[in-house]
Image (spheres, rainbow, N blue to C red):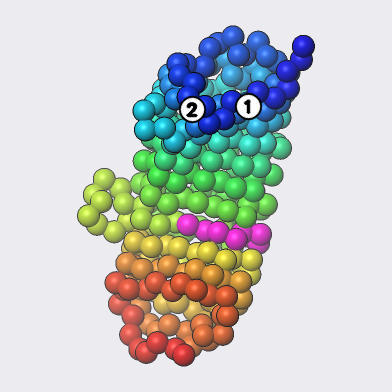
Amino acid sequence: IKVTELSLKGNNIIGAIPNSICKMTTLVTLGLENNRLGGPIPNCIGELSELNSLFLEQQSDYQSFWGTLPRSLCNLTNIEILNMVGNQISGPIPDCFGEKQHVLKDVVLNNMLLTGPIPESLCEASELVKLDLSYNPLTGPLLECIGFKLTHLTDLLLMNNNFKGTIPHSYCHLSKLRTLYILQNLGPTPSLNGNITGTIPKCLFNLTSLSELSFYRNKLSGSIPSSLCQLLLLNSLNLESNRLTGTLPECIGLLSDLNTVAITNNDMIGTIPL
């Protein structure tokens, strides 16, 4: 029997993933999410050469996977979806991940314990649509190459990490982007604002597909340009707790889809446009 899909979602399965699962070399989909599984992810996982979707998300209060991300993940050349939300997996993202993942669409690694910088190899996964690395203690700068090479991205979620530096102007090339979250990158001192500094690149307001934009709780300076009003699909704008100055563009009242605007705790002046 050639098993192509193994989905055991939402049971009370306990224990670890056995190494013998790697003998199921015809697997296309492996779904073990929302169980009570624990232990490390088998190093042999990279032997599942046909694997297209890997779901190891855990929402259990009792157990989760731990250890590090196996370097053998880099051998999964057919992987399109990788979801490991909510596990106690630590250490770096392998610096080879992305180099051979040319059909990879979704990477969801939030609410984990990943450290180190985002590897530049991830920018070689040029078909990526969603990249969610939120709620990890990742460090380093925001990668320039994301804007140059990941031009299919619709969702870029990088909140609650330890990133520092400025917002790359290259992100202005992400013309399909709908959601951009670069917020509350606090570093080792949660009582202070984050470590993202400089001004908001004005060209970001040319990304007319944007519906959600948040740079909450950083150290961004400068003013909000009137080109913001080009974002006709914008639903939520959160620039709260930065060092922004100037006034809110009067044309913001023309954004009929806009439901939420948060700009408190800045150094802005003027009146609220009607």
Residue 81 position in % (x across, y down):
63, 37
**Neighbours of disc 1 within 10 Å: few (<14), some (14-19), many (20+):** few
Quarter of the view holding residue 65: top left
Report the residue marked by disc 2: 35
Residue where numbered disc 1 is placed: 7
233 is higher (above) or lower (below) than 51:
below
Residue 3 falls in image quadrant: top right
Q: Quadrant of the N terminus?
A: top right
Q: Tell me, for residue 120, which label it has, or none.
A: none
Q: Which residues are magenta?
A: 173-181
Q: Is residue 225 left or right of residue 165?
A: right
Q: Residue at x 44, y 74 (%)?
A: 261
- Determine the secondary structure under disc 1: strand
Q: Amino acid at mark 2?
A: Asn
Q: Which secondary structure lies at badge 2?
A: loop
Left or right: 70 as drawn, with respect to 127:
left
Q: Amino acid at mark 1?
A: Ser
The correct choice, above or below, for 179 with respect to 28 in the image is: below
